Each structure stands twice: as structure tokens, then as C-alpha cells.
Image: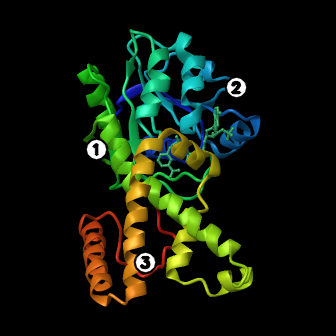
Amino acid sequence: MSQIYDRVALIGLGLIASSMFWAIKRAGLAGEVTGFARSSETRDTARRIGLCDRVCDTAQDAVEGADLVVLCVPVGAMGSVAQDIASVLKPGATVTDVGSVKRHVIQAVGPHIPESVHFVPAHPLAGTEHSGPESGFAELFDNRWCLIVPPEGSDQEAVARLRSLWEGLGSFVDEMDADHHDLVLAVTSHAPHLIAYTMVGVADDLRRVTDSEVIKYSAAGFRDFTRIAASDPTMWRDVFLTNKDATLEILGRFTEELFALQRAIRTGDGEQLFDYFTRTREIRRGIIDAGQDTDAPDFGRGTKV
Ligand code: NAP
């Protein structure tokens, strides 16, 4: 793969930014990568581990002269970061982001982007429950999807270049409308995370089962929930605050289905339970057939979400 951008600036140096950096280096996709993180602690860590060719003490310094600026901060912080860097963006540059919610990011960031700069939001569907500058690795995006969400009237060349970058990072790329993205992600990621948080919270509240029993006898189901429920609290708070409508819609449907299954259990309707579980099993098979997970019996350990 050859160089796609002369200079890339990563704003926010957590799991996603650090994985992007190592994958950019792996494939030689950029001449220079600059970086900025809010805290001096994260910037010091980045310098110590060689994350970014140059770590800057302000976002503006990192962005100056960059051809591509990637906003890698929690969704709720995107708008203020965009406002902070707007005046130093290079004409002709592209600003993108990796946020898990797209309509909100477009509304929060879009108004700050100057006419001469392209804005092409994106979302890599790859992650782990770990966060911070030391959690990233070059393979994170390999064979995962990245959804590019170009606002109406986007510059096609800027979109094509960003697509090449994500392909170079190892991803499959699709384009999608922002509202549809937010609904799809509410089903595939946001609602499941809320359910996992709730399930782990319930076990914690249930005093008849002691903490040590929960940990000692944790079976595959609960253990998988705890892995997801260990995800970053700031990131997930922002996801639910900014993808409110789609998440509430899916949770409403979830509650209805849960009541239906609850009723089937109470009335002893084994046929309904069996048919339901047969249908859901097919979805799992589809994910494995699509190469998006393995069938290995690791009970969630070491698996990425
Ligand atoms: P992370 O590991 O927690 O890193 C977040 C980075 O943002 C840190 O460098 C942090 O700086 C900085 N930051 C936090 N609040 C900020 C603020 N108010 N202003 C400026 N900088 C701030 O997060 P991540 O997992 O890489 O997630 C980054 C983005 O990717 C989020 O929008 C998330 O929705 C999206 N995403 C995440 C995943 C996932 O599974 N983790 C997957 C796909 C997309 P300090 O370290 O100095 O606090």
C-alpha cells in the first residue's frame, strides 16, 4: 500500500487513534502522523511508547498543515474539539471522525468546518473493552467494516481518499446515511451494550448471590456480558445521550420481546421458546459465515467486540 496523505493528525489518543497509528505505520499510509491528547499524562505515555511521529501540546499545533484530521474523542466532545481547531485547518484538508454515533457528530462538528475544508464522518466497527493510548494494536481493523457517512454534497475525491485509507487500515468499507447508521448501530451495538450493563448490574444487586459466587461460577453468558459491561463509561454515556431516539426505539422492541418470552416461560410454551431460539441461532451462524467472528470456544475471552 502506498502513502495516501502527507500528514495525518490524530486528536484524542485512545484505543481507536492508537490502533489507527500502528496500522498507518504498518502499511505506510501517511508521511507523518501528529497527535494530541487532552491530558499531559496521555501525551507523556504516547511519547514514551512512540505513539505518533510527533505529539503536540495543543490540538491546534497537531492540526496545522495536516491533510487529514481524525477526531478520536468521545462523541460528546467532538463539537468543542472541532471548534478549537477550526481556525487552523488547512484549505483542502479533510476532517473525519471515528465516533460511534453519526447524526449528532454531523450536527455538532459540521457548523465549525470552514467552506474550504471537507468533512467526511466515519465509524470503524471495531473495538475492544479496553481504552487509552496503550490499548491499541495494528490489527484492530483487519476484516472489520468501516462505515463512511458523507453528508449530502460531499466532495467525491475526499470520500474516495478516506475510503482508501480505511481499506489500507485493513477494513471493508461501506457508505451509509447518518440516520440509518444510528439505527443499525442501535440494534447491533448500543442496545446490546445497555443490556449487558443492566445484566451485570442486576447480578451485582442480587444479594442472594454473593459477589464471589458471581465471579467463581460465572458461566459463558454472564462472562460475555461482563466483558462488554467493562467498556469505557465516558464513551458509552455519550453514545446513549447522543443516539437517544434510535436506542429507545430498539429498547422498546426489546422489552416487548422480553415480555413475550417471559409469558412463554410462565405458560410453559416450549414450542415458542424453541422456535425463537432456533431463529436466533441462525443469526449467529450468519455472523460466523460472514467472517465477523470465529466459532472457537473461548467463551468471550480475548474476543473483540
Ligand atoms: P479512549 O480510548 O477512551 O480515548 C479517548 C481519547 O479522547 C483520550 O485520548 C482522551 O484524552 C480524549 N478525550 C476524552 N475526553 C475529551 C475531551 N472532552 N476533550 C478532548 N479530548 C478528550 O476512546 P476510544 O475507544 O479510542 O474512542 C474514541 C472514539 O471512537 C469515540 O468517539 C468512540 O465512540 C469511538 N469508537 C470507539 C470504539 C470502541 O470500541 N472503543 C469503537 C468504534 C468507535 P485523555 O486520555 O487525555 O483523557
Name which quarter of the figure residue 260 lies in.
bottom left
Are dots 1 and 2 in contact, CB under 8 Å? no
Q: Which label is found at residue 57?
A: 2
Looking at the rendered image, the quarter that the N terminus falls into is top left
Query: In the image shown, does 236 or 191 lie closer to the viewer?
Result: 191
The image quadrant in which ligand 1 is located: top right
Query: In the image shown, does 205 or 173 lie closer to the viewer?
Result: 205
Question: Distance from label 3 to label 2 (Cα)?
Answer: 55 Å
Residue hosting label 3: 262
What residue sits 52% from the left and 44% below the top? Answer: 239
Q: Residue 153's x, y, as percent?
A: 26, 19
Residue hosting label 1: 173
SS category of the residue bearing label 2? loop
Q: Amino acid at mark 2?
A: Asp
Q: Kindly give the residue lying farthest to the right in the view shown.
A: 41
Q: Is residue 172 above or below residue 63?
A: below
Q: Amino acid at mark 3?
A: Gln
Q: Residue 188's x, y, as percent?
A: 38, 57
Residue 125 shows up from this direction: no
